[in-house]
Amino acid sequence: MFDFLDLDRYDLFGAFWTTVQLTVFSAIGSLILGTVLAAMRVSPVPIMRAFGTVYVHIFRNTPLTLIIVACSQLLAYTLGMSMGAEFATDTMSFRLAVLGFVLYTATFVCEALRSGINTVPVGQAEAARALGLGFTQVLTLIVLPQAFRAVVAPLANVLIALTKNTTVAAAIGVPEAALLMSDMVEQEAQLLPIAMLFGFGFIVLTLPTGLLLGRLSKRVAVKR
């Protein structure tokens, strides 16, 4: 059934390794940017709240493919940004794809984290302010640690969605799993078994993540 699979001709493991790298780097960047956006959305400064709200609404409602292509066409070919990879097209495409994923996925991290912030009793923040702590101290020392514990499961869903969304990177030529799948379908003309093979590959990537983070969310859940 899988006699078309020639690992010397098709770098299957290399393609999925690129998918894993895209997921890991994008997840780290999204977590950082999403946390900053969540802090801005609950900030007492109106202009920061407004910026966070506008950013989230614009990027969350923009198709991911459009963001990825815009990163490639606008930043790389119009503005000349090379992301530190002037002489390596593949590396530049990879970094631009990560940037696009970070800009898009951070909005979902932000909203998940903001919902976690809303689960923290208001009285805790008021008590901290009564002790003389500033907004940043209240947020980083009291609110965010509890918020992260409350949203492990939603963040797991965001991570799983990010893993599947990495297939969009094929639009700018990043040699990940979806691009290899497209090439194999074109060369071998066996759509169903090739689709099953790559579907199984993504299940292998996402299922353990969901199970592991699901158990972690129960273990670290805040008992109220």
Image (cartoon, rainbow, N blue to C red):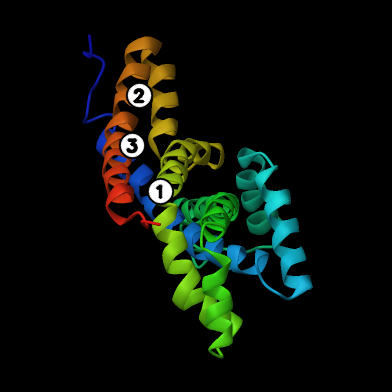
* Residue 1 drawn at (x, y percent): 22, 8
Q: Are marks 3 and 1 in contact (CB under 8 Å)?
A: no
Residue labelled with disc 3: 206
Q: Residue at x 70, y 42 (%)?
A: 61
Between label 3 and label 1, give the one nearer the viewer.
3
Q: CA distance from mark 1 to mark 2?
A: 16 Å
Q: Are marks 2 and 3 in contact (CB under 8 Å)?
A: no
* Residue 183 drawn at (x, y percent): 42, 25
Q: CA distance from mark 2 to mark 3?
A: 11 Å
Name which residue type carries label 1: Thr
* Residue 86 drawn at (x, y percent): 52, 64
Residue labelled with disc 2: 199
Q: Quadrant of residue 202?
A: top left
Q: Residue at x 50, y 54 (%)?
A: 98
Residue labelled with disc 1: 23
Asked whether residue 195 is in view, the answer is yes
Name which residue type carries label 3: Thr
Q: Are marks 1 and 2 in contact (CB under 8 Å)?
A: no
Q: CA distance from mark 3 to mark 1?
A: 11 Å
Please, what secondary structure does the residue beneath circle 3 have?
helix
Which residue is outermost to the bottom? Answer: 132
